[in-house]
């Protein structure tokens, strides 16, 4: 297959590109700038967002497109940062929609990134793809606007990848979550009762592949494991797997002081279940946090 990956140089994108190159697919990566030391080949090429916007015919004949692009939420949410977080998502989705519309032969599927934040937060509710969107804070507002923008992508099967906490041993948020345990000061954050919905990076990549290949996968798809855990359980599992103490609670007010409004991501959670993936027969390699962290530990030791 010939597949376009927008944001193919990011954390998830790099893993996805490696997975599909190994499978023998032909890939086109859309990125702001060509990465240093990039080695294009017969199966891998790069184009810029400006090129895609101005000359969409460059991707004529593709079978699928995956758009993972968007400014990270993991930063202090100043007014300027908020504007860029939203604008970056709306801008790239608009370019994708325009490019798809211009193609003479459209791809069968577009997988567009979204976020599990679309359900809002709750200490006790469980959310699946049948749950309504709730615009109740900045992350949920971003997700709602993101998916509204994706409605402009017409004439293809559209699947919305609602990303949860993605665990990888080198990149993403997990090295930061593990750091306090490495320093001997790991513990629950806030009450510790808030839910963490998560997925191993390998299962994330496999799920995207499953969404591309399975013609019944359409609309919102929760990219999370079937076994979410509370923040306290998440930390205890890190401690058990890496043989570090779980004892030093971080009060909510310290988190709010340190990161400002971003604290909502750390102090409020949601219990998200991947009903659609399970109903369509997707098989998780790492369905439990214990298995996921043991694998990440083994990969780090083998580096």
Image: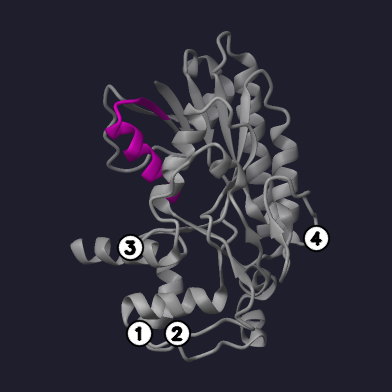
The label number, if any, that marks residue 296 in the structure image = 3
Q: Considering depth in this image, is 251 or 247 the residue closer to the camera?
A: 247
The answer to whether one can see residue 69 in this image is no
Is the C-beta separation of discs 2 and 1 under 8 Å? yes
Precedes in sequence: disc 3 or disc 4 = 4
User: Which mark is nearer the camera, 3 or 4?
Assistant: 3
The CA span between labels 4 and 2 is 30 Å
Horizontal and vertical percent position of residue 240:
37, 79
Q: Is disc 1 placed on a helix, strand or loop?
A: loop
Tag count in the figure? 4
The CA span between labels 3 and 4 is 34 Å
Identify the main secondary structure in magenta: helix
Q: Tell me the quadrant of the picture where the C terminus can be found.
A: bottom left
**Residue assigned mark 4:** 136
Residue located at (35% from left, 84% from top): 244
Is the C-beta separation of discs 3 and 4 under 8 Å? no
**The quadrant where residue 19 appears:** top left
Q: Is disc 2 placed on a helix, strand or loop?
A: loop
Residue located at (36% from left, 27% from top): 45
- Neighbor class of circle 3 (other Cα within 10 Å; few <14, some 14-19, many 20+) is some
Q: Start and end of the magenta stretch?
A: 11-28
In the rendered view, would you say 170 is above or below 205?
Answer: below
């Amino acid at each position: 297959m010939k597949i376009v990956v927008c944001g193919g140089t990011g954390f998830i994108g790099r893993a996805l590109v490696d997975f599909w190159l190994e499978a023998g697919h032909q890939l086109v990566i859309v990125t702001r700038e060509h990465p240093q030391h990039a080695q294009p080949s017969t199966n891998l090429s790069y184009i810029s967002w400006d090129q895609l916007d101005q000359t969409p015919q460059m991707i004529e004949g593709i079978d699928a497109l995956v758009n993972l692009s968007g400014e990270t939420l993991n930063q202090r949410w100043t007014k300027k940062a908020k504007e860029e977080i939203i604008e970056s998502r709306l801008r790239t989705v608009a370019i994708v929609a325009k490019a798809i519309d211009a193609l003479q032969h459209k791809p069968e599927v577009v997988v567009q990134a979204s976020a599990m934040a679309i359900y809002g937060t709750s200490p006790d509710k469980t959310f699946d793809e049948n749950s309504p969107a709730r615009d109740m804070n900045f992350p949920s507002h971003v997700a709602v606007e993101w998916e509204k923008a994706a409605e402009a992508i017409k004439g293809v099967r559209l699947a919305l990848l609602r990303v949860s906490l993605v665990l990888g041993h080198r990149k993403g948020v997990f090295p930061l979550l593990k750091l306090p345990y490495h320093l001997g000061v790991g513990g629950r954050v806030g009450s510790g009762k808030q839910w963490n919905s998560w997925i191993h990076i390998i299962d994330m990549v496999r799920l995207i592949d499953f969404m591309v290949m399975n013609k019944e996968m359409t609309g919102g798809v929760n990219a999370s494991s079937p076994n979410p855990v509370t923040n306290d359980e998440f930390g205890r599992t890190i401690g058990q797997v890496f043989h570090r103490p779980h004892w030093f609670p971080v009060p909510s007010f310290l988190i709010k002081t340190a990161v400002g409004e971003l604290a909502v991501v750390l102090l409020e959670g949601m219990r998200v279940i991947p009903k659609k993936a399970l109903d369509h027969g997707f098989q998780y390699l790492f369905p439990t946090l214990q298995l996921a962290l043991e694998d990440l530990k083994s990969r780090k030791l083998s580096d």
